[in-house]
C-alpha cells in the first residue's frame, strides 16, 4: 500500500469509530487521541480493525508508534508492504 492509501484507511477507521470526527482539520503530527477525543477503547478499536482488515499483529509495546497519523503511516507502511 502507498502512504496516501494507508492514511486514508486510518482516517476511515477513525470516522467509523467517531462519526463526528473532523478529519479534514486534523494535524498529521499531533496525537490522534487529543484531536479526536479518543479513549483507550477507541484506540484498541483502531488496532483491532487493522488486525481484521490486514491480518496485522501489532504488539502492545508498539502502540506508542500509532500516536499520530504520521507515525501510524510510518509504522504501517513497511508492514503492509509485506502483506501485499
Image (cartoon, rainbow, N blue to C red):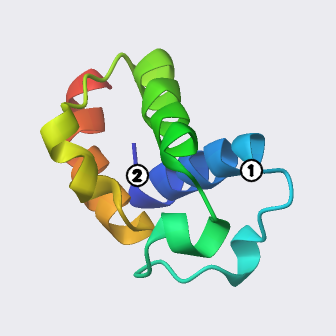
Mark 1 and 2 residues: CB-CB less than 8 Å, in contact?
no
Disc 1: CA contacts within 10 A as few (<14), some (14-19) or many (>=20): some
The quadrant the N terminus occupies is: top left
At numbered mark 1, what does the secondary structure look like: helix, strand or loop? helix
Query: What x and y, as percent, mark residue 46?
Result: 51, 38
Residue at mark 2:
2
Q: How crowded is mark 2: few (under 14 residues within 10 Å), some or many (20 or more)?
A: few
Where residue 58 appears, as percent x and y from the top left, is: 25, 31
Q: Residue furthest right?
A: 20
Q: Residue at x 13, y 41 (%)?
A: 61
**Above or below for 27 versus 67:** below
Measured along the vertical axis of the image, is residue 56 above or below residue 36? Answer: above
Q: Residue 15 carries which label?
A: 1
The image shows a total of numbered marks equal to: 2
Q: Which comes before the other along the chain, label 1 or label 2?
A: 2
Q: Which label number is shown at residue 71?
A: none
Q: Which of 32 and 11 is in front in this view?
A: 32
Q: Residue furthest left?
A: 61
Give x and y (percent) for residue 16. Answer: 75, 40
Along the line of sight, which residue is nearer the eye, 40 or 2? 40
User: In the rendered image, which quarter is residue 57 located in?
Assistant: top left
Residue 11 vs residue 52: left or right?
A: right
Kindly identify the residue that appears in the image at 59 percent across and 56 percent down: 38
- Residue 41 location (% of width, % of height): 54, 37
Q: Is residue 22 left or right of residue 78?
A: right
Q: Residue at x 84, y 51 (%)?
A: 19
Instruction: Report how far apart the C-alphas of labels 1 and 2 lie in the structure.
Output: 20 Å
Nearest to the eye among marks 1 and 2: give it: 1
Q: Which residue is nearer to you in this view: 25 or 20? A: 20
Above or below, comparing residue 10 to residue 36 in the picture: above
Element at badge 2? loop
Amino acid at each position: 500500500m502507498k502512504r496516501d492509501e494507508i492514511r486514508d484507511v486510518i482516517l476511515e477507521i477513525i470516522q467509523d469509530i467517531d462519526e463526528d470526527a473532523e478529519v479534514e482539520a486534523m494535524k498529521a503530527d499531533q496525537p490522534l487521541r487529543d484531536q479526536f477525543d479518543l479513549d483507550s477503547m477507541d484506540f484498541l478499536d483502531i488496532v483491532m480493525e487493522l488486525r481484521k482488515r490486514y491480518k496485522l499483529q501489532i504488539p502492545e509495546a508498539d502502540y506508542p508508534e500509532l500516536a499520530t497519523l504520521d507515525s501510524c503511516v510510518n509504522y504501517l507502511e513497511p508492514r503492509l508492504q509485506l502483506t501485499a
